[in-house]
Amino acid sequence: MIRIASVPASHVYVRHLTVPDGEEPTLRLPDPIPENGRKVPGGWWPPVMLDPAWISSNHRSFDAFHVHFGFDAIARPTMNDIVHELRTHNIPLIYTVHDLRNPHHPSPGAHRELLDVLIPAADELITLTPGAAEYTAREWDRDCTVLPHPHVIDPEMFELPRSKTPTFTVGVHVKSLRPNMDPFPVLDTLSETITTLPGARLRINVHNELFDPENHWYAPEAASRLTEYARRPGVDVVIHEYFSDDELWEYLMGLSVSVLPYRFGTHSGWMEACHDLGTAVIVPSCGYYSEQQNCQVYGFDEHHFDAASLDLAVRRTYGQQPDRATWASRARQRRGLSKIHHDIYERALG
């Protein structure tokens, strides 16, 4: 059995790369717990494995090192040291290119510096879409294996019936206004569009962090502006704490369509959850969201916003029944992902 130091192992994407109903040929080490015990949803951040000293002390416990997420706070010299430590012990590096542009960074420079270390150094590269693979080949002259994003929800959730309400609900989840989000032109357009569609409503969800002066994400002007949308006909503004997984799935199943208000980014687990639950998705033209699943696309990036294309995308989803993944298809996909990852690890070790 091949032992993988997966960075991280507890993220839902990584957990769903395994065989769902059989013997898994790959052993992924559990995420080490940091000394301070700090934990956030999705795993331990920053991952303890992303440390040259940890690799030096633990290199005999794994055969290959696979990086997915969690290196936002790593400086380029540290990443160089990580690569050096892996080479010192003849351990192959695999990197899955999830983000070509980090959605948490307002500018691309810091993330690009790390990609300039990781991508050339990797023995094997994986990404999620052909467009991301083409970009990687163009920028770094490296080939990627293109593999689809696995399911996000648990198997039993695929059987949950959707609501039969006749209301056409368009949802925009502003969350805590991370840097790649610019909801206001999107909300301005949507609040106009829904008034022309019988039975349509717009639901805007906002994390309460934006209203807390003690919180890192405190943004009083943006928060005030968001609450003002509740004055418009057919618009609901819901302020809440972070959803648990169950609360998030319930929220998504209550939407007819989820609109992603991103000016930049690459791929999305959110839209995979929507596909699992049978909620339509409207995605921006930036990044490679449109290559992940069947969805509507509107013009939005750091340089322009096309209100007409967003209006048209909503009208195209109005009254339509979106595709919904089945557990059978997602389980079959997982078995394929498990095998291909195992093959990639063997190739890297060979």
Image: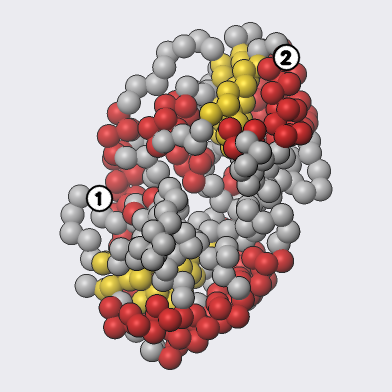
The answer to whether residue 274 of the structure is visible from this angle is no
Determine whether the residue tagged by mark 1 lies in a helix, strand or loop.
loop
- Picture disc at residue 104: none
- Picture disc at residue 232: 2
**Distance (Cα) linking label 1 and label 2:** 46 Å
Q: Name which residue lies at 38% across and 32% down.
A: 246
Mark 1 or 2: the one toward you: 2
Q: Give x and y (percent) for residue 81.
A: 53, 83
Give the position of the N terminus as an image quadrant: bottom left
Question: How many numbered marks appear?
Answer: 2
Q: Name which residue lies at 63% across and 8% down.
A: 198
The answer to whether residue 46 of the structure is visible from this angle is yes
Q: Is residue 73 above or below residue 187?
A: below
Q: Is residue 164 above or below residue 209?
A: above
Q: Give x and y (percent) for residue 152.
A: 40, 43
Q: Is residue 102 above or below residue 89?
A: above
Q: In the rendered structure, which disc, 1 or 2, sits on the residue that comes first in sequence? A: 1
Residue count near mark 2 (Cα–Cα under 10 Å), binned few <14, some 14–19, many ≥20: few
- Name the residue carrying label 1: 20
Q: Give x and y (percent) for residue 279.
A: 49, 29
Q: Nearer the viewer, residue 238 or 290?
A: 238
Q: Give x and y (percent) for residue 194.
A: 68, 16
Q: Name which residue lies at 73% across and 59% down.
A: 107
Q: Nearer the viewer, residue 194 or 181?
A: 181
Q: Name which residue lies at 32% across and 40% down.
A: 154
